[in-house]
Amino acid sequence: MSVYLDHAATTPLRECALEAWTRAQRDLSASPGNPAALHFGGRRARRMLEDAREQVGACLGADMHEVIFTSGATESDALGVMAAARGMRGRDGARELIVVSGLEHDAVAHQREVASREGFEWEVLPVDAGGVSELPVTVNGARSSWDGRLALGSMTLVSSEIGTIQPVEEFASRVHADGGLAHSDVAQAIATMDVSFRRMGVDLVSVGGHKVGAPAGVGVLVATRGIPMVTDRPGGGHERSIRSGTPDVAGACALAAALDETVRERPAFARRSRELREHLLTHLPLGVEATVGESAASSAIIHLSLPTSRPEAVLMAFDMAGIAVSAGSACHAGVTRPSEIVMAMGRSEEAALGVLRVSLGHDTTRADIDAFLGALPSAIRAGASLDGVTHARNERNEEG
């Protein structure tokens, strides 16, 4: 029997999403049509797409006309950060600064390369020892060093790696005080937190479908109507001319179904995930501890610090036991390197290597957690055995 505890990387396809996708594909096959076409098939496809848009908007506390369908959170992040920053600079040439938290997913963090090529400045906020973004000091409600130069600020709501909840509302308020736009990736928050576009006070929000049980390859960017956005991918004018390309109607229907079920199940899952998290943390073996405190953490992402700096050996031991977990961000899978986020918290490089992420989903059970706990001691021993080998090899190299 296998145990899946890597839901922060991707979560299994929900049955409701599969049914919605299959039903949509059958309808589209029976009556083919591009949503942009004027004939009956096109009008039917358009109606299906707009119904999905309305449902997604309702789930996220947004107006349906603010919902832009994309290929996933990565594309949504790229559009949300750079298209909005370009738009702001187009209105005011002095707005050339983009500020992001130090806990962003690579989909945001790597926009730095694009921003640099386009002449933007890039600032990364520090992270405190508890894994929470440190907000800048304000003067009369505004950050003086930004001084009217801020185009956009981006802060994830829940860190995909360590699971800490970030002060997005306060950050957005400070961004707006300087006249900038605020963006947040909420992909890791929807299952456990009441995510409302309106209440968050941001201008843009990114969501990935496969993090809520929809198929991979579909996502959403929620963008306030009227904000300036300049896309780098012009085309046929689809999705408010921000994301051109023939829409994936069936994918949108599947995402709407998965998101609706996720939101309806959220109170129960949030309660159950807290109980599972508490059970796991109270039964950890000696030497293993939570990387971050309970008060600032999502109940569905449990980040652990281990007494070994060989995560690949730990993961292999879990894999052989039929248990899927992650050594950090899943986007870095297969690459053994220290966690930049953990080092930003003030930990050593060795400590930033010895970390493990356990992430829960709607189908996670107490038996799954017990299986993980049962396999954990031997997995740590597997890593520790290589720690000794590495140490001895390094000593020999130094002597030579």
Image (cartoon, rainbow, N blue to C red):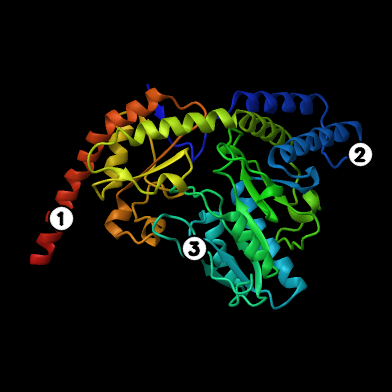
Taking the view exactly as shown, the residue that stands out farthest to the left is 399
Find disc 3 in the rendering and name its residue. 134
Instruction: Point out the tag, 2 or 3, that comes first from the N-terminus.
Output: 2
Where residue 289 sits in the image (x, y, percent)?
A: 30, 44
Report the residue at 37% width, 31% height from top.
Answer: 279
Report the residue at 11% width, 60% height from top.
Answer: 395
Find numbered disc 3 in the image and state the secondary structure of the residue it sits on.
loop
Most foreground residue, 398 or 87: 87
Find numbered disc 1 in the image and state the secondary structure of the residue it sits on.
helix
Q: Amino acid at mark 2?
A: Leu
User: Marks 1 and 2: which is nearer the front?
Assistant: 1
Q: Amino acid at mark 3?
A: Glu
Instruction: Point out the tag, 1 or 3, that comes first from the N-terminus.
Output: 3
Q: Amino acid at mark 1?
A: His
Where residue 334 sits in the image (x, y, percent)?
A: 38, 47
Give the label on residue 124, or none: none
Where residue 369 sits in the image (x, y, percent)?
A: 37, 29
- Name which quarter of the figure residue 276 lies in: top left
Q: Marks 1 and 3, Cα distance to the nearest angstrom?
A: 36 Å
Find disc 1 in the rendering and name its residue. 391
Find numbered disc 2 in the image and state the secondary structure of the residue it sits on.
loop
Find disc 2 in the rendering and name its residue. 38
Q: Is residue 400 visible?
A: no
